[in-house]
Amino acid sequence: MFSSKGDAAYVELRGRILSGGLAPGSRLAQRDLADEFGMSLTPLREAIRRLSSEGLIDLDTQRDAKVAAINATEARQLFEVRLSLDPTAAMLAAERRTDADLTTLRAAAARLVPVTRTWGEEGLTAHRAFHRALYTASHNDVLIRMLDDIWDKSDRYRRLGLDLPPGDEPRTRDHREHHELVELVTAGDTTGARDLMHAHIERSLTATAIAVLEQRELSS
């Protein structure tokens, strides 16, 4: 249930942008969207303004709205913050995890599949659920909120990485590292969990996407 039509439009639009349902750089047909959502333009524009403040939509003076383009600068900034926060979350999870946290984490690990073009959205969804289970076990609410937002925004870059041909070995290693993280958190190995997470992020799909975007921008 949503408290207002603006909230409902916000959630729907944000989900479509982050999932790639609305492509980066595409123009928003506001009247069509309002009709589809069963609302007037006013709550839709309220949602668009909120998403503009988050950097997900670009607005011009004529009230035209476009989905924000993806670029190497934003990708690198998200990557740099994750490189700091994710290892901290893994370390705290190893220190603070409860039995219930471990049950959730193991269940999430059991649903993992390699994040490749073959598995697509299923792989990304399971991957996100695993990492959220891990950083929720940190029991640091501020850190959890920050990582939720960063993971959402990073999803657009992960989808770009999915379209690249990295070969089997990197994705197989990535899959294996998730299970190693479960073992380290279970054992309470704070240093091991932190260090493995740092290496894991360095080899992530976002890191792959950064290199491709930088090359594209140099070539354009």
Image (cartoon, helix red, strand yellow):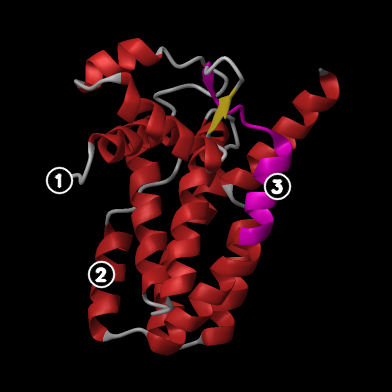
Amino acid at dot 2: Thr
- Spatial separation of the CA atoms under disc 1 and disc 3: 35 Å
The percent coordinates of residue 145 (x first, y second) are 44, 64
Determine contact: label 2, label 3, CB under 8 Å.
Answer: no
The percent coordinates of residue 214 (x first, y second) are 77, 33
* Mark 1 surroundings within 10 Å by alpha-carbon count, few (fewer than 14), some (14 through 19), many (20 or more): few
Lower sequence index among marks 1 and 2: 1
Residue under the point 72% across and 37% down: 72
Residue under the point 67% across and 42% down: 74
Magenta residue check for 89? no
Q: Is residue 214 above or below residue 66?
A: below
- Spatial separation of the CA atoms under disc 2 and disc 3: 30 Å
**Which residue matches tag 1?**
1
**Which one is in front, 43 or 148?**
43
Q: Which mark is residue 76?
A: 3
Q: Nearer the viewer, mark 1 or mark 2?
A: 1
Amino acid at dot 3: Arg
- SS at mark 2? helix
Amino acid at dot 1: Met
The percent coordinates of residue 122 (x first, y second) are 32, 40
Magenta residue check for 77? yes
Q: Residue furthest left?
A: 1
Q: Nearer the viewer, mark 2 or mark 3?
A: 3
